[in-house]
Image: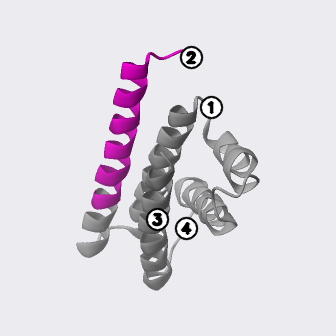
Amino acid sequence: MTLSKYNRAALIKYRLGQANETLQSAKLLMDNGYSLIGVVNRLYYACFYAASALFVSRGILIKGHRSVAPMLALHFVKTGELNNQWLKHYSNLLRNRMTGDYDEFAEFERDKVSQMFEDSEGFIVTISSLI
């Protein structure tokens, strides 16, 4: 996909907006006692949108959710631009989101989801600083 400079900037802004809005929806769900499965889902998508913005900013094409972690590793962790802790966080979120979406009777502990939330905030800030 070839984007003009204007369209690339607009898409990056849009994806970062989605990331922050989705992070806030996760906070609302958590603060109001809704399903932690929904919170984990929203946290994953918040980080996915941030990573998508980063890829757009560098002209890197991704081919779906499962390609994000390997592409982060190849283009950002391997080069030293991104600490491996953020790759681990993203990978864990993907795994947890899949568990929540597809495993019968999945449950998450509130304190672990709270930590996922804090780490997701850090992920989004870190990714934004690379753009």
Q: Nearer the viewer, residue 7 or 67?
A: 7
The amino acid sitting under disc 1 is Ile
Which of discs 4 and 1 lies nearer the camera? The answer is 1
Disc with the residue nearer the chain's start (4 vs 1): 1
Label 1: few (<14), some (14–19) or many (≥20) C-alpha neighbours in 10 Å: some
Q: Which residue is mark 3?
A: 120
Label 1: element kind: loop
Q: Nearer the viewer, residue 124 or 90?
A: 124
Which of discs 3 and 4 lies nearer the camera? The answer is 3
Judged left or right of residue 30, residue 76 is right
Which of discs 2 and 3 lies nearer the camera? The answer is 2
Return the mark for residue 1.
Answer: 2
Cα separation, mark 2 vs mark 4, equals: 37 Å
Which residue is depicted at the point 36% across and 21% down? 6
Which residue is depicted at the point 39% across and 39% down? 15
Judged left or right of residue 96, residue 33 is left
Label 3: element kind: helix
Label 4: few (<14), some (14–19) or many (≥20) C-alpha neighbours in 10 Å: few
